[in-house]
Amino acid sequence: MDKLPDKSPDRTIRSLHITAFAGSVFALILSVMLILNYLQMKRIDPLNSRTLILLNERLNTNPEDETLREEIRSLDLLARKAFFTSQWQIRIGGYLLLISGLVVVISLKATDFIVKISPDEPGRKKLDFWEQQSASRKWIAGAGVVMICSALILAFMTDHELGRDLEHALSGAVAAKGEPANANVGSDKANLENGAVELPTDVPGMVADSVTQRADQPSGFAANPVGFPTQAEIRKNFPGFRGPGGIGIDHHKNIPISWDGKSGKNIIWKTKIPLQGFNSPIVWGDRIFLSGANETRREIYGIDAGKGTILWTTVIDKVPGSPAKAPAVNKETGQAAPGMTTDGRRIYAIFANGDIAALNFEGKIVWVKNLGVPSNHYGHSSSLIMYKDRVIVQYDQRGSAAVMALAGPTGDVIWKTQRAVKVSWASPVLVHTGTRMELILAAEPFIAAYDPENGKELWRTDCINGEVGPSVAYADGRVFSVNEYSKLTAIQLGEQPRILWEDSEYLSDVPSPVATTQYLFLATSYGTVVCYNVMNGEKFWEHEFDQTIYSSPMMAEGRIYLLDKLGVMYIFNASDKFQLIGQPALGEGTFCTPAFTDGRIYIRGNNNLYCIGK
């Protein structure tokens, strides 16, 4: 009897053909859906929702309508849910499209391999899957490949643009990423009756108060022989964004609560700043420091705190490795958004093109270098912060995220730690948790802490999604993170940090929260301020100011100071009941967070620097 032909290769090839066909159909359907989704997103402008426009117009005419406010808030929550759903669908669709494409390619390759190794036997019908009607099949295959590649590209673009567009729609403006907040140095033991904050005396990087004053140094500068500030020096001054360590709690007394920019009431002086910048003033002794920049020029200013006179201007140019052309930035971030810092010996500033410089108090350059051009779509804005005699830089850029410590006297890299995160506009936070110093950073997808001595990661918690502008807040062993279209998270520190509670009703895309041992105060960019119980997330109160807010709240003498975009300062008690003390107006718009010294407030407006006091 003759041997029958082996049919198993034919069945395998037929199965692979069916798999390839099914994968192709599935991929084409997904491609059509993703392309239609992209076209729909382009056609429907989330910035001009007619429903929200009409509701806001009604609210403007009747601001006391709480039912209407709840309706707007409900639409806001629905928009967030729609954002997360769309983002998930787009991301999963892209992955499925890639997988189906791989299935098709693998099936066809396997078919070719089986055909090549299978001998021709009598009775077998040759299966010409790609050879029969080859011209039409090649055109169809080519069109399918083009459609699938287009869909993958559009899926990425939609996933990236969706969050940004919805953020703009609900916040009312493109995020001004230049004013993120930091946390604190020392245990945040806030006394709400007098605004005092207890700091530990054994904090590494701070030494005892036994120092002397040199006659040739600016007032407030103490000659600590180890080369970095004492605890008393730090508390006496305002050395960085949001004060000592970036905690957002000020230690000074007799802070003004009443002024008027137009009439000049309690305005000690006003000084025009040559170049715009959204960094807040820093103060050491009798000097104030700011930076400003445009596309062609970068400057640092030393200002007399008593008279407001610009004592010197230092131009930062001809930096080795600096790009010939400034990077493109958002207009609400600018070329000089990051906050400066000082150790009382030198001042440090960084710009949007990656130039970082150290100057002495007379404006002479000590060192300058370029860290590489930042790669992000708003512009670099992470503020600098000091630890001992080293300046800490959070440099979370697209494709190359890192945090590093540079030696204050030389600019040499002491340590540098790579980070598996996306772009972040938040600033580093330095706190003492009771047993050690921790450098805490926020960026998608996690909050992480590092040892500021060597850059070693201490812990991380996954709780961040999307673009991150606000920095974390810290109080009494608890860390608080927040960003728009994500969630507010409270983390309890310990041997194994754990999530204490979460909330998603009110979220911030720009202002950073401030915390005490009892309360967490959070301001949104659209003007709502909320007070939470730090232990369980219970909401004590909420209040709507109906103005855009980019500044971060500051606490001084048991009061919260919060600036809106128009320059109106909302002052209210730091308590579980909302009690407005006053709302004095600067008379000029501002994005910046104020700085404080005894009896004075310094506010950088869009054009001028103001000194407020009695």
Image: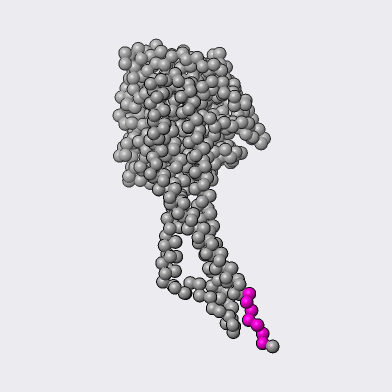
Apparent side of residue 274 relative to residue 143 in the rendered image (left or right): left
Q: Quadrant of the N terminus?
A: bottom right
71 or 340, which is in the foreground? 71
Q: Which span of residues is magenta-colored?
A: 2-8
* Pick the front one: 115 or 197: 115
Verify whether residue 5 appears in magenta.
yes
Name which residue lies at 54% across and 34% down. 487
In the image, residue 335 lies at what x, y percent?
Answer: 36, 37
Residue placed at 47% from the left, 42% from the top? 423
Q: Is residue 348 above or below residue 137?
A: above
Q: Residue at x 54, y 14 (%)?
A: 194
- Say which quadrant the C terminus sits in: top left
Taking depth in this image into account, of 117 and 513 the one nearest to the observer is 117
Image height of 468 relative to 529, above or below:
below
Q: Is residue 611 magenta?
A: no
Looking at the picture, how far across and down is residue 88, in whole percent?
A: 52, 45
Considering the whole magenta stretch, tell me its main secondary structure.
Answer: loop
Q: Position of residue 261 (x, y in %)?
A: 34, 17
Residue depicted at x 49% and y 19%: 560
The image quarter containing residue 475 is top right
